[in-house]
Amino acid sequence: MALLISIGHGGWFTEEELAEELRALSPGSDIRPASNPGNLDEITMLAVSSLKTDIAAQLPNLQLVQKLGAGVETIVNHPTVAPHVRVARLKPEEPAREIAEYCLAYILREQRNLLHHAAAQARAEWDSVAPKRTHMTTVGVLGLGHIGGLTARLMASLGFQVHGWSRSPKEIEGITCHHGAEALPQMLGQCDYVCAILPSTTDTRGLMDAELLAAMKPGAVLINAGRGDLIDEPALIAALDRGTPGHAVLDVLCTEPLPQDDPLWRHPRVTITPHVSGWHLGDALGDVVENLRRLGTGQALLHEVDRARGY
């Protein structure tokens, strides 16, 4: 029984670095980077950040694909992952906090007029503008799971009026919760900021289309730190040109890395960051080696995914 690590993209941990960290957590476990996989027949667990290759098809005894993060959309329906192979994800606290902080950072950028003041400094102009008042500002959070719920609670703790939306009913103290497709347009129309932290499923892909973008409050800011395929990007460009929403902060895109000729790069009402809102896994790496152990003993896995539902 062995664990193979195949990150699936650059710009993060290397497979060798991650293998070293996991071995430190579970001395004696057979943990291998993709650069030195050994006998593939011995691999029973595959750990990935993004599954974009056919590596799963090369592992005849694969039993589990472990996502090194939360979103599993590149795994659950991947053609090389056989139906009997189980899928698990992580629910780490550290990147959840980082994503909440990311949303807060861009909200505060607008609340405190930081772009205005930077432009005034460049012109050597003393141009005072009053900051927006927190208790008179409404923040919407799309997705009230592990990360979205934490984000909503953070915003509420700072005094924002917070509305949250999810597919099924939720109750969170201090948050006005909405659920179901019919409730979404009305909620969007009330929000000065909308933080999207939804998984990629058949129900959410393209959810923010021209109709829902038009339902947003004029001048509102849309912050997407969930999955890029939530937003119809051509519809977003057209909506931004009309001022509804007024700005979009995009940490995730439909295509990553974003091609250099994509118009989103140069749109004056778009801020792009390269999928960095949640970076560190913190103590969640312990769940990876724990699932390796549980797989060997037949115990229930941590954070196993329903492949049919996609989360």
Image (tube, rainbow, N blue to C red):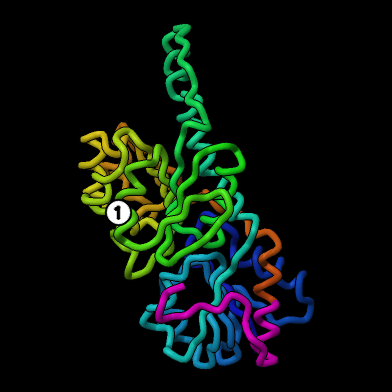
Taking the spot 76% from the left edge, 76% from the top edge, the residue there is 26
* Residue depicted at 41% across the width and 77% down the height: 309
Kind of residue indicated by mark 1: Met
Whether residue 238 is visible, yes or no, is yes
Mark 1 closeness class: few <14, some 14–19, many ≥20 residues within 10 Å: some
Could you say where residue 54 lies in the image, as x and y percent from the top left?
Answer: 41, 79
Q: Residue at x 45, y 9 (%)?
A: 127
44 over 254 or under it: above or below: below
Q: Give the quarter of the figure containing the N terminus.
A: bottom right
Residue 3 place in picture, x, y as percent: 62, 80
Check the image and report above or below for 21 versus 228.
below
Look at mark 1 in the image and give the residue it sits on: 208
Quadrant of the rendered image containing residue 273: top left
- Name the side, left or right, on which 43 lies relative to 230: right
Please indicate whether residue 286 sits to the left or right of residue 231 in the image.
Answer: right
Q: Check the image and report above or below for 109 versus 38.
A: above
The span picked out in magenta is: 290-311
Let me know if residue 225 appears in the view. Answer: no
Q: Where residue 303 sits: x, y (%)?
A: 58, 75
Majority SS type along the magenta span: loop
Q: Nearer the viewer, residue 67 or 200?
A: 200
In the rendered view, does 259 fall on the left or right side of 75? left
Disc 1 element = loop
